[in-house]
Structures are given as C-alpha cells and as structure tokens.
Image (spheres, rainbow, N blue to C red):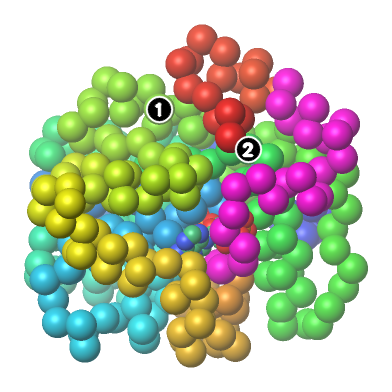
Amino acid sequence: PPKEVFWNAREICQIDGFWFYADFKESMAAFRSDFQPRSDDVLVTSFPKTGTTWVMALCHNILHRDDRVEDDVLTRMNPHELIPTLEVFFLTDQVQKDLVLESSGGGRLLQTHLAYTCLPEAVKNSGRGSKIVHVTRNPKDTLVSMWHFYNKVFECPAGGTSPFPMEGAVESFCSGVLPWGPFYEHVVGYWEESKKRPDDVFFLKYEDLCRDPKEHVRKLASFLGKPFPPVGDDEEVEKVLWLSSLGRLKELEVNKNVVSKLTQIPNSSFFRKGTVGDWKNYLTPQMAERVDQLTQLKLHGTGLSLDDF
Ligand code: A3P
C-alpha cells in the first residue's frame, strides 16, 4: 500500500474490510462493544471529507433552533469537539461524560466515520428508532479535500513540508487503502441501508446541499422530526443555513489559530473552500479518468450516482 500518503508512516490495520490508523484500535473496539444506542439518538455518518462538519452543524442548529442565540455553543467549540468522532475518542473523558449525560433538547447528536458494517451491533440491531444521517460527496472532490486536509494536519505542529504527491493520493484512493477506506464500499453500505430503511437512514449528497440548500435542509429537518414552517416562510431555514455556513464558521475565533485539545489538530483544518468541482484544479485528465472509471465500476447496479455534478 502507498503508506506515505494519508498514513504518514503511522501503523495501519484492517478491520472488517476497512482500513484504520492502528492507534484507534482500542477506542474503536470499546465503541463497537460498549456503546448503548438510545431511541432519540441522531448519528451523523460519513466518509471523511464529504461534508461531515457541515452536516453536524446543520443537525445541531436544526435540533437546537429554539434555544436562545446567546447559547450558540458552536461559537465556542468546533463541531468536531462538540460532536467527537466516536471510534477515535470513545475512551476520552469528554465522550464518556457526553454519553452518560441525559442531553436536553431532543436527544444526543453523535458522529462516526465507520462504515455501516463496522457500526456497533447494538446500533445495527437497535430497531429503536434512533436515526442515521449519512452524507457523501463526489469521489474526486473527496479525494482532493482529503489531500489538502492531510497536508495540513501532518505539517502541524512541526512546520511546513512539501505537499504529498497527488499521484500517491490517487493511488491510495483507488486502491482503497486510505483512512476509513475503501470509499466506495463505505458509501454503498449506507446507500443500501437507506433504501431498506428510509425512515431511519437519511442519505444526503454534499452537492445537493450546495445546489439547493433550503430544499435539502427542509428534508433533513423533517427527517429529524423538527420540520420547518411551510415553503414560503423561509426565515428559520435561512437562519439555520447561515449559522451552519462555511463563511460564518470559518471566521469564528475558535476556528482560527486554535489547535483543539481533543483532536490535536487546528480547528481551521476542517474549513477550506467548500465548492463543487475543485478537483479540476488538482487532478490531471488521466487521474480524473482513472477515478471516474472506478466510480462507474463500483457503483454499477446500485442506482447511486456520485459523479454527475
Ligand atoms: P473542501 O476541502 O473541498 O473545501 P469534512 O467536514 O467531512 O471533514 O469535509 C470537509 C469539507 O467540507 C471541506 O471541503 C470543507 O471546506 C467543507 N466544509 C466544512 N464546513 C463546511 C460548511 N459549513 N459548509 C460547506 N462546506 C463545509
């Protein structure tokens, strides 16, 4: 495997067909065996760099939209600190505290990058009404976003080095040997589940959110049991979109020049450009063709399309 890209010489391991940093093993095992789902949980699931931060902010702001504005916790905490990735931080004090606390205002908002098959059995078998919100994104933008992210976080705090070669990133993405990968099996798992259980699993594409944010945020809110007033009365929808927007979150002090005590990476790493099609600025036609062919092959017969943007 092309270890130098995305893994940065860290030890890696494969669990149920998916790749992870070996240092997450203990936490991941504890999450998978000890996590107790509740009927009012909302679990945001995603492959990294597909829009997790945005969707967490949207879910938070939808679920808490009746709270007072002064209580907007996202002005004090990065979404990844407020809603930590469970398999990575399950054993930390913060997550343990959050998990036992009875949360107010409509249940717990949780997050994982695990593939559907890797989720705790208790979640898969719960049948207790807890909800999954899955976000995905076109593979080429996901790959390019990941390349930027790892270039940024692995430079910190040691200082700048030259970026990882894009060839290696493409190779890693296409071979499936990347953190939480392979991408395609990951997304198809949630896609299939959303078709089987549409009331429990909400499937969202980053590009659809970009194209028609109001429509998709309305659908998301209805899924979460917090529908907005009818179309035409858009004030609340617009407010949630603004509170969750890249432009706003990026400019908050907490998301500038702050290295998170929890994640140990700069909070700013989660906010970059947030556009559709940025891959055109980074992938050669040959690289794009290689990813497109793989996308066609892997999604063939699933009814899911991810490269029609
Ligand atoms: P780019 O690198 O293409 O800019 P994740 O949250 O899963 O880590 O994904 C990160 C990607 O989502 C980055 O994409 C980032 O800029 C974008 N993003 C983060 N917050 C966002 C927001 N509030 N609205 C839209 N896009 C956002």
Is any part of residue 3 visible from this angle?
A: no
The C terminus is located in which quarter? top right
User: How many neighbours does mark 2 have within 10 angstroms: few (below 14), some (14-19), or many (20 or more)?
Assistant: many
Of residues 154 and 125, the one nearer the viewer is: 154
Disc 2, ligand 1: is the CB inside 8 Å?
Answer: no
Local SS, label 2 = helix
The N terminus is located in which quarter? top right
Of residues 61 and 146, the one nearer the viewer is: 61
The label number, if any, that marks residue 66 in the structure image: none
**Displayed quadrant of residue 73:** bottom left
Question: Residue pushed farthest front?
Answer: 232
Give the labeled residue for mark 2. Answer: 139
Q: Earlier in the sequence, mark 1 or mark 2?
A: 2
The label number, if any, that marks residue 191 in the structure image: 1
Point out residue 244 in the picture as x, y percentages from the top left corner. 37, 67
Q: Is residue 82 left or right of residue 80?
A: left
Amino acid type, callout 2? Pro
Of residues 75 and 128, the one nearer the viewer is: 75
> Looking at the image, which residue is at 65% across and 16% down?
297
Is any part of residue 111 visible from this angle?
A: yes
Q: Is residue 214 left or right of residue 8?
A: left
> Looking at the image, which residue is at 47% across and 49% down?
210
Point out residue 168 in the picture as x, y percentages from the top left corner. 85, 45
Residue 273 falls within the magenta-colored stretch: yes
Amino acid type, callout 1? Trp
Local SS, label 1 = helix
Point out residue 206 in the picture as x, y percentages from the top left corner. 48, 46
Numbered range of the magenta stretch: 270-293
**Displayed quadrant of residue 100:** bottom left
